[in-house]
Image (cartoon, rainbow, N blue to C red):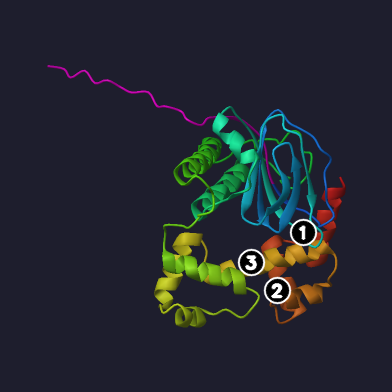
Amino acid sequence: MTVQYVLKDFETAVSVKKIANIHYFEFTDQYKTHSDAHDFCELIYIDKGALRIESEGFSGELSDGHMLIHRAGEMHSLSCTDGLAPGVIIIGFSCDCMELSSFSRLPTALSAKEKRLLSEILKDGMSVYMPPYDMPNTADMKKRDSYPFGADQLLKNHLEELLISLIRRKKEEGSFLDVSDSGNTAVAHITQYINEHFTERITLDSLCFLFATNKTTVCREFKREHGKSVLEYVSALKIKEAKRLLRLQKYSATEVAERVGYSSLHYFSRAFKAETGLSPKKYIETVLSKLEK
């Protein structure tokens, strides 16, 4: 006797139809845009610093670790807060899900899981689409002639997973005040400490002493959580803050090096070029040139 299996369809709660752009901008503290609207949704996330947002749904400051999703057709503009030169992720996409409308009215703090998804979206996007990723008003991002198998689909899937996570958390929690991660608590505490003290001298020995653990555990679990070692993570934070300070155009390279914890300008310049491919001077010249265009 042949068993007749009944195959079931998937229910698609959130479907991203198309993508318009995927950007990581490093703005100066004087940058601003005129008010405009698009026929697609626009996710805006603050990776570092803060932005002033004026839109039909929200008027106020969007701060580090928070995002908004402008509705299709919603008028909006942004301006950089004086003294804060933010790093900003902007993703334009087409999606008909009505649940997204609430995210245009209230800044939403991303959980650690959602930040990792956003990171994957950026990586997927950069593997599929050609640069520049930081040129304002890029109307037609070109796809590469070839890209890793399935990368385009992963970009769509990860973006849908992020939106589903946000909607589900809103339904379950009723707010976005609690963004605690259910992962490794020790690593979460170590990460918080590093985020607050990265301009100081941080060693594995000091972390092990402060958090009553050992080097093997710290190295293994931290890299599993963040995809990089403690020292690589600290270095990335230093360079990210250095880039922000350079974009303020208020400090010399020597002053920036001191502020982020480098012992000399030579060591800072070498680390900066290793991370960005540019000298500090060339970096700010490049940023200003792109924003002027």
Q: Amino acid at mark 1?
A: Ala
Res. 260 mark: 2
Residue displayed at 57% across by 29% down:
98
Compute the Cα span from label 2 to label 3.
9 Å
Q: Dot 1 surroundings within 10 Å: few (below 14), some, or many (20 or more)?
A: many
**In the picture provided, is 109 more to the left or to the right than 270?**
left
* Label 3: which secondary element: helix
Compute the Cα span from label 2 to label 1.
15 Å
Where residue 168 appears, as percent x and y from the top left, is 47, 41
Q: Amino acid at mark 3?
A: Leu
Q: Nearer the viewer, residue 86 or 79?
A: 79
Res. 237 mark: 3
Q: Earlier in the sequence, mark 3 or mark 1?
A: 1
- From where the camera sits, is residue 274 visible? no
Q: Residue 82 occupies which quadrant of the picture?
A: bottom right
**In the image, residue 4 lies in the stretch drawn in magenta:** yes
* Label 2: which secondary element: loop
Q: Which residue is mark 1?
A: 85
Q: What are the residue bounds of the magenta stretch?
A: 1-23
Q: Amino acid at mark 2?
A: Val
Residue displayed at 68% across by 63% down:
240
- From where the camera sits, is residue 215 visible? yes
